[in-house]
Every structure is written in C-alpha cells, then in structure tokens.
C-alpha cells in the first residue's frame, strides 16, 4: 500500500510542477519579411542569454513558447543586417511583435554553401567557385526528379538509354563516374558507369543543390575528377512545431495522358516533420509513376521513402537519415501474331541507404564532422512470356533473362576543423569506402576497399588573399593509388566587388567494380569487364573572376567568367577487345583533354530576376594524333537563361527556364568496302524551355501549372555511324517525349 501512495504522490508532484510551468509561460510570435515584401524563411529568432529560439517558417512567421520575463529579441540571417529589440512576455498571454523588414546587406539571404567548406559560409568567401540551385528555384521549377532541375545548367548534358531506362550526366565535357554525386556530402552508389542514382532520390526532400566544377579529389576521393554535385536535403528549422505537407502533380507525356495512372507523369508526396526541444522526427513518402510507352519511353513506377531522427543543441547536431527506393521499369513486348506469346522484361531496383551524421562544435576554434553510411542496392532482371489469349505468364529460361546484381557500400568520413590563429585553419580527415558486389554477370564476389587520409589548410595571407593547399593519401585493395593527390586553391580579393579564384588540382578515379568484373550482353549491349585496368588521373587548372554590384540604383548585378583545362591519363573508356573484335571491353587511353569557359550574369530589379549564361566547351580529338590536319579539339556552345517575376499583389510567380544546346561534333573512323577513313559526325543542336506559373492561394495552399519542353523536342539528328558496341552513339538521340503540360497542388499545415 505504501508503494502505491508513493507512486501517487510522485505523480501529483510532477503534475503540479507541469501545471505551474505551463502557467508561468507565455507565447511570442511575429512576422518577418524581406525588403521586397516576400516572407523571409529561415531567419534565426533568438532570445539572447536564454535557451529559447526558433527559425521563421516558409511564410516568414515564427512562434515561441517562452518563460515569462523580459528579453532581448534578435533576428539574424546571412546577408541581412542583424536586428534586435526588447520584448516582455507575460504568463498565459500572447505577445505579437510588429512586422520586421530585413535590410539586405552585401550578401544575399541564401548565399551560403557547405560543399568542400570547413563550415557553412558565404559563397563570396569560399575559395571554390560554387554554383547553387536554391530551394526557391526548385519550387518554381516544379520538378518530378532531380534531372529536371539540372537540364538547364551550363556545361551539364544528359544522355538517355531507352533500352535500360537509365540516364547519364556529363559536366564540362566529363561524364559518367568522373562526376561525384553526393547526398548531404555522402557519395551515392551506382551499379554501373552511369549516374542513374540522380533520379533515384526523392526531389521533394532536396532543399538545394551545390555544384563545384573541377577536381575535388582531395576532399571527396575517387570519381570527383570532373566535379561534384551535392544534393542538400531539408534539415528542419530548429524551432518548435509540427508540420504536415504534401504535393500532387499530374503531367502529360507529350499529348498522351491518363489521369493518375497510365500515360503521363503522376506524383504524390506526403510528409510530416515534428520538432520540440531540439529533437526532430520526420518522414516522407513519394510515388512517381511515369508511362511514356506509346512514345518509346520505358514506363517507370517508383516508391520513395525517407525518414529522419535527430537532435540539435547549440553545439551538437546529430541525426540519422534513411532513404529507400523501390523501382520497377517495364519493357513490355508485343504479341507474336503466330503464337500469341508476348515477351515482357522488367527491371526491379531496390536501394536502401542509411546515414548517421554529426556536427559538433566543441568551442570557438575546434569542431568535428562525421558521417557514416551503409547502402544496399540491387537491380533484378525479370523476363516473362505471356499468352495473351489465356493470360498464362511464365518465367523464361534464356541466358541472362533472370538475373540479379547486388552492390553494397560502407562509408565513413571524419574531419576535424581547428583554428590555429585568426588567419590559419587546418582540417585533417580520414575516409573509408568498402564496396562489394555479387551477381550472375559479375565474376566472383569482388570487393574494393579504399582507405584515405587527407589534410588541408586555409591560410589568410593578407586581408585580400587566402589560399587552401591540400593533399590526399590513399591505399586501395585492387589498384595502385597515386602516392599523393595535391591541390591548391587561391582566392584574391581585387576589390570589394571583384574576386579572382585560381586553382590547380590532381584528380583520380579508381576502376569501378563494373569495369573490372561485370559482363553484360543483350540485344543492345555487348561488353566484358577488364581486370587489368589502371586507375585514371588528371591534372586540372581553372580560374574565375566574379563581380558583384548591389548598389546600381535599384538594380542588383552579379557576373562571373571562368575557364578550365583538364588533362587525363589512363582514361577509362570502351573499346574493341583485341582477343574478340565482336565484343567491347574497358580500356585505358593514354591522353585525353577537355577545356573551355563560361560567362554567367544575374540581374535583380525589384520583383524581376534575369539570368543569362554562355559556355564553350572543347573535347580532345584523339584522331588528330594520326592526322595533324584535324583540329585538336571539337567545340560545342551552350546558352541558358532564366526569367523569374513575382507579382506581389496576387502572390503569383511567372518563371521561364531556357537552354540552347549547340551542335556536338566528333571525328570517327569509318570503314567502307574495306577502306578506313576519318569522318566528321555531328549531333544536332536543340532548344529546351519550361514555362511555369506558381500561385499562393493562402499560407497553406499553392497551385502550379505550366508547359515543359516548350519546343517539343523528341529525338535529335545524329550523323555518327557507330551503331554497335557496348554503348552506341549512332542514330537519332532521344532527348524528350515532346511538349507536356502539368498541373500541381502543394499544401502545408503548421502547428506551433
């Protein structure tokens, strides 16, 4: 009996304390806007010398439960002047503060980057030239996959394999596994020599994208020769709230459409995010369904899910993230008129990625960042025969018609950032990457283990000159890694509005499991792995000049010009197997080069933002070595432009995204009647454009609609005669499935 009275007493005591605590609290709320009248999201709202704080939501509002008393309220945002004033909170009452308009300074609100940095910092102060695609640009684009927001970027091109239903990316003339794809700084696993993982990440979880051109091998190891694309996901606000959000979008496939299932693109997304006292729990699920079969594109059904559990305090941010994907690609045949048998082939993909990350600020000079991940990835080929008269479906027994390839990757990366003096910081780090594979087409059960130590330092030589030397030391289980990978980045402040960046970096890429051990034969592919491949490496030079002017009347201008030169050795590509000319294999090429330049301009005037860019890229012509009358490089131009206009009175945004992809020339050998000669092939130029309209109905609901692929591009002409081999480049090149129309609805509900 005494035990029960004791429990009851403790319960009543705790309950009384809770009631007393609640009655001793009040509520502080307010609204923050930018000088152009737009809601200011992500602004830090702090009550100085107290544990209370929050961040403004997408609508610019904030609300905090605060113990009664007097405080100094401070509003802080990157790129805005800090605002502070006194507030008094009364118990049991709500204190509504007057609307605050932020004064923009020499930086822009979201002009902050993390890729390759010691800590998040403004783009202006970074020694790297980083391109960003902001959350606002992603919202206005209304994408259904990551590829949609990259297609209009300078130097980026995609190729589509309609047989396998995959896409690959090239960045400044460098393609495939030479472009590193990261999710919150953690590398994404790909089974082959294409970057199909880009479109296997839920675009609804991506907050913004950072693109760094040129080798980042010191920071990120193998595959980062051409550059890095870092997908930064949504992290929460650090405030006290419950937020439920969702999105539905329907899109035609050319002129073909069937509502919610069938021809077209159909996307449904639902998510929830809860934050309280530094803790965060969130979940997100998305269904992507695409059917372009009537236009020659393989139907795809994706189910994507993610979840986050984390804790955040003033010094520590610790979180676990899960990303899962279940994907089915359907390549359904047509019935044989004589047998009524139809052969269908489905590709079934599963990707499960676990991340555990930590950011720990021990003091003003010392911090630690760590990331560990495990990825389990598989792709299964399932071939069936269907009797269209009886409905009887059976598995086929042909070679390779029932196949599964499984890959797994274990990754760890840890760095320490230490500020020796006000002018010198160092970052030592270690990285471990263990990758394995099994499958009927894979020889044995190979494993590649890579271990690395890297060290860099950021030195402020003068108030105007900062340099960042670095080196990486690697040990690999299957190839001889270069003994050291060096880099040197320099930023020179020529004036308050003009910055010069110069860089040299050594890049390297280890042969992938597929290139070493994977054998792939079907109607369109014929390729054998090569266990004797060497690691490829590069010497790269790049420079850029960035100019900013924020006070030319009401006009805000930013321009940048850059150039690059990359020389590759032992470049891994495909070529004919000397032992069997009917089969392709992976080979090393002694010499390969890319070079070029870009020119970007951004103009902001009141509610209008206009961007105009130009790039010119040259790719090395290997045949020039045997015929010096040929040019050493083949060149192709690109032009892009973005127009964003905000109509404040009706809360509507009009957006136009445009890109011109110039002619893509190449020289190749052709044999006619036993005579081999050199011919110039050419892929035709084409234009792409998306026009979108986004309208806020209220603070919870917004509508979107528009036209994608405005110029109705499907296939572009290609005069290449290469119609065989592992990855044909001949024949018409599929770009899109024609002009499409979309309509979408987004909603969110927040409770503080």
Image (cartoon, helix red, strand yellow):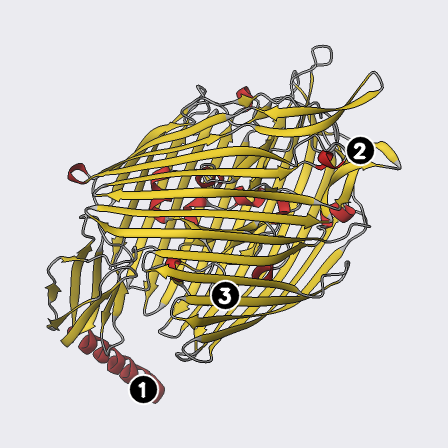
Q: Residue at x 64, y 33 (%)?
A: 164
Q: Which residue is mark 3?
A: 357
In-front residue for pair 310/316: 316
Q: In the orientation shown, which residue stands out farthest toward the right?
A: 579
The quarter of the rendered structure image containing the C terminus is bottom left
Do callouts 3 and 1 mark residues in contact (Cβ within 8 Å)?
no
Label 2 and label 1: CA atoms lie apart by 74 Å
Mark 3 crowdedness (10 Å alpha carbons): few <14, some 14-19, many ≥20: many
In the drawing, does residue 313 fall left or right of residue 348? left
Report if the CB atoms under discs 2 and 3 are less than 8 Å apart. no
Choose the circle earlier in sequence order: 2 or 3: 3
- Residue 638 shows in the view: yes
Circle on res. 6: 1
Q: Residues within 10 Å of mark 2 (few under 14, many from 20)?
A: few
If you read the primary sequence from the N terminus, does the residue marked by circle 3 or circle 1 appear first?
1
List the residue tagged with mark 2. 399
Residue 664 occupies quadrant: top right
Q: Residues within 10 Å of mark 1 (few under 14, many from 20)?
A: few
Q: Residue at x 77, y 52 (%)?
A: 534
Cα distance between the residues tagged 2 and 3 = 43 Å
Q: Depth check: 489 or 9 in front?
A: 489
Tell me which corner region of the image, top left, top right, bottom left or bottom right, holds residue 270. Answer: top left
Q: Which of pointers 2 and 3 indicates the residue nearer the eye?
A: 3
Query: What is the secondary structure assignment of the residue under circle 1?
Result: helix
Image coordinates for residue 409, horizontal then vertical, percent: 64, 57
């Amino acid at each position: 009996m005494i035990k029960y009275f004791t429990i009851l007493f403790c319960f009543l005591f705790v309950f009384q304390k809770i009631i007393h605590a609640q009655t001793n609290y009040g509520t502080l709320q307010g609204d923050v806007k930018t000088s152009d009248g737009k809601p200011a999201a992500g602004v830090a709202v702090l009550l100085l010398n107290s544990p209370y704080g929050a961040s403004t939501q997408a609508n610019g509002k904030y609300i905090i439960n605060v113990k009664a008393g007097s405080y100094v309220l401070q509003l802080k945002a990157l790129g805005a002047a800090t605002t502070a004033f006194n507030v008094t909170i009364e118990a049991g009452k709500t204190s509504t503060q007057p609307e605050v308009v932020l004064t923009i300074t020499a930086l822009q609100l979201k002009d902050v980057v993390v890729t390759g940095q010691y800590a998040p910092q403004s783009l202006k102060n970074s020694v790297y030239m980083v391109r960003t695609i902001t959350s606002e640009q992603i919202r206005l684009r209304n994408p259904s996959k990551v590829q949609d927001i990259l297609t209009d970027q300078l130097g980026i091109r995609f190729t589509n394999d309609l047989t396998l239903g995959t896409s690959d990316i090239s960045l400044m003339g460098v393609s495939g596994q030479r472009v590193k794809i990261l999710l919150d700084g953690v590398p994404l696993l790909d089974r082959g020599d294409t970057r199909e993982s880009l479109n296997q990440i839920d675009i609804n979880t991506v907050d913004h994208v950072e693109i760094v051109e040129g080798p980042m091998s010191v920071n990120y190891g193998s595959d980062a020769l051409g550059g890095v694309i870092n997908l930064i996901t949504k992290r929460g606000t650090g405030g006290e709230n419950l937020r439920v959000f969702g999105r539905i979008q329907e899109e035609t496939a050319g002129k073909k459409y069937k509502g919610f299932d069938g021809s077209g693109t159909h996307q449904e997304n639902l998510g929830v995010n809860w934050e309280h006292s530094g803790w965060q729990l969130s979940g997100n699920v998305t269904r992507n369904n695409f059917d372009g079969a009537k236009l020659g594109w393989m139907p795809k059904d994706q189910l994507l899910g993610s979840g986050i559990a984390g804790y955040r305090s003033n010094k520590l941010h610790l979180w676990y993230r899960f990303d899962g994907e279940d994907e089915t690609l359907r390549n359904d045949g047509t019935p044989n008129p004589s047998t009524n048998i139809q052969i269908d082939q489905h590709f079934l993909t599963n990707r499960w990625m676990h991340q555990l990350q930590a950011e720990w600020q021990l003091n003003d000079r010392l911090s630690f960042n760590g990331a560990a991940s495990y990825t389990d990835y598989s792709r299964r080929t399932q071939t069936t025969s269907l009797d269209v008269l009886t409905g009887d479906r059976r598995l086929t027994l042909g070679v390779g018609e029932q196949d599964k390839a499984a890959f797994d990757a274990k990754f760890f990366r840890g760095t320490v950032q230490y500020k020796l003096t006000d002018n010198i910081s160092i970052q030592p780090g270690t990285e471990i990457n263990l990758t394995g594979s099994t499958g009927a087409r894979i020889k044995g059960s190979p494993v590649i283990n890579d271990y690395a130590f890297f060290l860099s330092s950021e030195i402020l030589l003068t108030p105007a000159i900062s340099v960042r030397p670095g080196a990486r030391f690697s040990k690999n289980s299957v190839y001889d890694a270069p003994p050291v990978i060096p880099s040197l980045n320099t930023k020179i402040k020529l004036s308050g509005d003009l910055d010069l960046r110069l860089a040299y970096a050594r890049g390297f890429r280890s042969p992938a499991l597929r290139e070493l051990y994977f054998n792939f034969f079907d109607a369109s592919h014929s390729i054998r792995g090569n266990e004797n491949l060497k690691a490829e490496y590069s010497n790269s030079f790049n420079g850029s000049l960035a100019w900013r002017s924020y006070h030319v009347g009401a006009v805000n201008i930013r321009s940048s010009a850059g150039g690059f030169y990359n020389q590759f050795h032992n470049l891994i590509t495909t070529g004919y197997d000397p032992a069997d000319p009917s089969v392709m294999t992976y080979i090393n090429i002694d010499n390969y080069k890319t070079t070029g330049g870009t020119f970007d301009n951004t103009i902001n005037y009141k509610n209008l933002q206009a961007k105009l860019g130009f790039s010119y890229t040259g790719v090395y012509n290997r045949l020039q070595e045997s015929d010096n009358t040929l040019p050493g490089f083949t060149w192709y131009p690109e032009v892009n432009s973005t127009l964003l206009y905000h109509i404040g009175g009706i809360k509507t945004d009009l957006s136009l995204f445009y890109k011109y992809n110039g002619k893509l020339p190449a020289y190749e050998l052709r044999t006619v009647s036993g005579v081999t000669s050199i011919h110039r092939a050419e892929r035709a130029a084409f234009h792409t454009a998306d026009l979108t309209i986004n309208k806020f109905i209220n603070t919870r609901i917004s509508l979107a609609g528009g036209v994608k692929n405005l110029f109705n591009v499907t296939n572009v002409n290609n005069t290449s005669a290469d119609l065989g081999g592992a990855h044909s480049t001949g024949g018409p090149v599929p770009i899109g499935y024609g002009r499409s129309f979309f309509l979408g609805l987004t909603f969110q509900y927040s409770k503080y």
